[in-house]
């Protein structure tokens, strides 16, 4: 059916209709639609309605099919149990649906899923040929995940937050619910897509509070965004009104000058010193506080500006330095550095660099390395420390920090080192800490490699800053105690290696310390003292030679044992000879070490043989007091050698094993024992012990001689001989002991000359005491000088030639009578 029009136009027909011009203009419905017969045209248009082909034409799709009407057309599908054999053609044109023989395709198939309880509650059941599959609904998991759910192995709520820790993404908190979960961002974070919960695809991002809120911290403040939060601090020249602890809403920034003007310092203290003391005390009272990097930077800046170290400061420190203020700055530095170390930051590095401070922090936890030392570097200075060894004594974690402060050398000037040398700072001052790390000892020294500021000849010295709390109190003139002033000290620090470019310092300290390099020229050598020493030593060596020859000849008498005296002279003569050349091998490291070690051995041997000589005399007198027949005085010769040379060799070996670098060139440009790590006590200790034992033997000898002397009052000659023996042993102890004691007092020219005169003439004194004071030896010398030796006389020489010990034989014979 169509409606006629005189002509076709865009608006000639209604919906679902089209205009046709054949034979005249008219409107017709599109395919699948028709104009209802009862419809009356209105305003030249007709309404078209859908044709239900399934009703109008029976079996339009063919046998065993289902017809479904849709707008404008229809669809045909095969009945259940039938299959379309020709899917390429539309159903209805040809018979296409054929019966499916289920008995052949799925023999005896049972749909278990018809039983709604077969899988249990909160499950999905899927039937498959010959079986079925049970799965928990999303958000649930079987009680035994290794088995499929059923009526016994029921599905329970799955905690997605535990099963997948990344399900919410970073900086978010996962909250489990029954059958589901939801995520919330941590404080200071939010998601970009607010209509979705946080997840790995929609992560939580940091909120920049400082950008979103103007003057968030207040006026004249510095707001610094941080992950999940923000930090408030003050700009340079200002400081928080509440100190290093920022209190929101309460704290504001004040100019340093305003703060100083408001301070009322204690009597005798400046406003600046009181301000620094307040910072140090606040950090001490809040030892466990964690501060932001911005606050730490401001703390360093304000401290150094108020200290006067900056040359532009209105109250700049003078060229005399300020040891007290410098010590407080070190305390503040330790507190600020410790506030940057968080307990959870193990195995991380942190660097802080400003115009004032250059800081490096290394944290460590056990198991994070292979045991090698950790190296921290700042401004050409590196520190090597074994943090693993420290962590073992600190609950498995440790931290080390190294820093330099600009212009710190204006406070801790090099003249604070107690030395006669001229001093000059040749490096930045380095300060090292072990923040929040308990420690009792170092398994190995801490090494610092320090670059020189300039090339300059002189002595390179490693020193550390000994504050008031690190020094021993001393007694003042009134008898009370006063604290020793802060100063640079070399105790516990030594030069491990040095060249023109850098120096390696090793330190064994267990507390906060600061290290610098000192360049100092040694005091000029006095040519007079050098000349006097060589002349006197040469004279002493001549008399040593005479004494040695005399003791060798004296050994012809079988009753006399001069072994101790002979080797005493040999050891002393050898050490004196080497001392003439001990400054000639300073530049040769190996030769200098060897010479220092040989000197150490010879001096120890000298005191050992001196002790053996005293022991020989004591044993002789002791036997005499018991009226025993003495075939040969003293200990056997092998025993004497074992003690005289064996004991010094053991001491030398142990000393070299403990600290081999203790031998070599010293600051005074001589090959000797170093004072580093108190290594000089490897000689001083044994010498003091030997002198003490020698003194004990001397008094014991006097006690044993007392009854003998008392019984010999009538025999004047024997009494004189005995007293002469006592005088000889006493003189020998004084000669060898007192001269070394004088060596400790070299503060002026008088003691220097006295030491040279007495110490160099030990050979002369020994020759006088043991040779010239023996009348038989004097007689033999006269014969030798007169060249009147005869063969018969030579035999008599061997018989008559004896030392003071022969007098003891005479005393013994007298006692027997």
Image: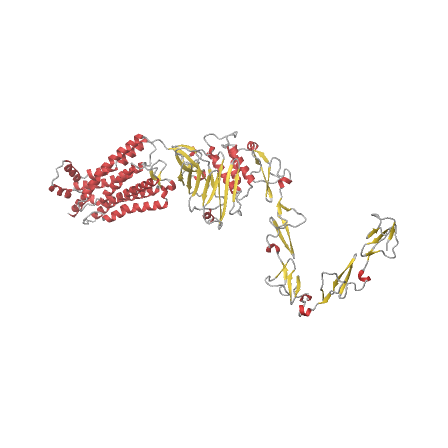
814 to the left or right of 477: left
Task: State the quadrant of the N terminus.
Answer: bottom right
Residue 521 seen: yes
Judging depth in this view, the residue of 139 and 97 nearest the camera is 97
Please tell me whether residue 99 is drawn above or below residue 432 in the rendered image: below
Q: Which of 288 and 570 is in front in this view?
A: 570
Whether residue 187 is visible here, answered yes or no, is no
Q: Is residue 181 above or below residue 255?
A: below
On the image, the x and y values in percent for residue 332 come to: 51, 38
Q: Which of 679 and 186 is in front in this view?
A: 186
Residue that appears at 62% across and 43% down: 207
Give the camera-side residue of 59 and 323. 59
Residue 776 position within the rendered picture, expressed as x and y whole percent measured from the top left? 16, 40
Q: Quadrant of residue 682?
A: top left
Q: In the image, residue 356 lies at what x, y percent? A: 52, 35
Residue 63 is left or right of residue 568, and the answer is right
How many labels sit on residues? 0
Which color scheme is applied? secondary structure
Left or right: residue 686 versus residue 471 is: left
Please provide percent x and percent y for residue 803.
Answer: 19, 42
């Amino acid at each position: 059916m169509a409606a006629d029009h005189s002509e076709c136009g865009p608006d000639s027909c209604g919906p679902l209709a089209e205009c046709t011009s054949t034979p005249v203009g008219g409107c017709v419905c599109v395919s699948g639609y028709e104009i209802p017969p009862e419809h009356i045209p209105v305003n030249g248009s007709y309404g078209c309605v859908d044709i239900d082909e399934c009703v109008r034409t029976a079996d339009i799709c063919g046998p065993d099919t289902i017809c479904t009407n849709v707008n404008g057309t229809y669809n045909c599908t095969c009945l259940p149990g039938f299959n379309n054999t020709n899917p390429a053609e539309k159903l209805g044109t040809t018979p296409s649906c054929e019966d499916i023989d289920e008995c052949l395709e799925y023999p005896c198939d049972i749909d278990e899923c018809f039983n709604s309880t077969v899988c249990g509650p909160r499950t999905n059941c899927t039937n498959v040929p010959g079986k079925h599959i049970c799965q928990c609904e999303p958000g649930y998991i079987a009680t035994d995940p290794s088995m499929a759910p059923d009526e016994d192995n029921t599905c329970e709520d799955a905690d997605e937050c535990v099963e997948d820790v990344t399900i919410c993404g970073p900086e978010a908190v996962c909250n489990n619910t029954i059958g589901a979960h939801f995520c919330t961002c941590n404080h200071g974070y939010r998601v970009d897509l607010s209509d979705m919960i946080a997840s790995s695809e929609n992560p939580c991002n940091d909120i920049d509070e400082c950008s979103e809120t103007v003057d968030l911290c207040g006026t004249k403040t510095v707001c610094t965004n941080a992950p999940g939060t923000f930090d408030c601090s003050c700009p340079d020249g200002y400081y928080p009104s509440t100190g290093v602890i920022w209190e929101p809403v309460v704290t504001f920034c004040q100019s340093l000058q305003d703060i100083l003007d408001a301070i009322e310092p204690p009597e005798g203290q400046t406003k600046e010193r009181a301000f620094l003391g307040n910072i140090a005390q606040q950090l001490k009272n809040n030892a466990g506080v964690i501060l932001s990097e911005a606050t730490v930077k401001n703390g360093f800046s304000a401290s150094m500006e108020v200290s006067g170290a900056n040359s532009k400061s209105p109250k700049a420190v003078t060229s005399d330095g300020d040891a007290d203020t410098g010590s407080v700055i070190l305390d503040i530095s330790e507190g600020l550095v410790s506030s940057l170390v968080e307990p959870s930051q193990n195995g991380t590095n942190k660097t802080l660099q400003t115009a004032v401070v250059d800081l490096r922090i290394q944290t460590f936890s056990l198991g994070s390395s292979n045991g090698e030392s950790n190296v921290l570097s700042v401004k050409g200075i590196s520190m090597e420390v074994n943090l693993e060894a420290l962590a073992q004594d600190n609950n498995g974690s440790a931290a080390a920090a190294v820093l330099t402060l600009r212009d710190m050398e204006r406070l801790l000037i090099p003249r604070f080192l107690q030395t006669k040398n001229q001093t000059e700072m040749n490096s930045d001052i380095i300060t090292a800490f072990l923040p929040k790390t308990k420690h009792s000892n170092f398994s190995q020294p801490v090494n610092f490699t320090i670059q020189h500021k300039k090339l300059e000849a002189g002595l390179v010295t490693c020193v550390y800053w000994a504050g008031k709390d690190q020094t021993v109190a001393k007694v003042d003139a009134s008898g009370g105690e006063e604290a020793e002033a802060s100063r640079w000290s070399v105790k516990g620090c030594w030069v491990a290696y040095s060249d023109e470019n850098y120096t390696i310092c090793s330190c064994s300290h267990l507390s906060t310390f600061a290290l610098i390099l000192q360049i100092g020229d040694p005091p000029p050598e006095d040519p007079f003292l050098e000349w006097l020493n060589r002349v006197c030593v040469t004279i002493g060596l001549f008399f040593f030679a005479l004494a040695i020859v005399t003791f060798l000849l004296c050994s012809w008498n079988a009753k006399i044992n001069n072994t101790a005296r002979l080797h005493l002279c040999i050891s002393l003569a050898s050490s004196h000879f080497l001392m003439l050349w001990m400054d000639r091998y300073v530049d040769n490291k190996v030769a200098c070490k060897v010479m220092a070690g040989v000197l150490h051995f010879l001096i120890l041997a000298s005191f050992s043989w001196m002790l053996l000589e005293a022991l020989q005399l004591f044993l002789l007198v002791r036997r005499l007091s018991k009226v025993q027949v003495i075939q040969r005085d003293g200990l056997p010769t092998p025993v004497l050698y074992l003690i005289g040379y064996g004991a010094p060799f053991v001491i030398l070996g142990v000393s070299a094993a403990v600290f081999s670098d203790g031998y070599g060139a010293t600051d005074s440009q001589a090959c000797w024992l170093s004072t580093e790590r108190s290594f000089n006590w490897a000689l001083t200790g044994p010498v003091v012990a030997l002198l003490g034992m020698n003194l004990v033997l001397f008094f014991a000898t006097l006690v044993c001689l007392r009854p003998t002397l008392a019984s010999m009052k009538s025999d004047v000659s024997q009494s004189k001989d005995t007293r002469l023996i006592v005088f000889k042993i006493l003189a020998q102890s004084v000669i060898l002991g007192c001269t070394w004691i004088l060596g400790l007092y070299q503060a002026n020219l008088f003691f220097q000359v006295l030491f040279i005169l007495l110490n160099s003439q030990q050979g002369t004194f020994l020759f006088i005491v043991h040779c010239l004071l023996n009348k038989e030896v004097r007689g033999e010398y006269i014969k030798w000088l007169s060249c009147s030796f005869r063969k018969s006389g030579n035999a008599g020489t061997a018989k008559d030639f004896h030392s003071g010990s022969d007098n003891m034989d005479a005393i013994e014979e007298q006692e027997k009578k």
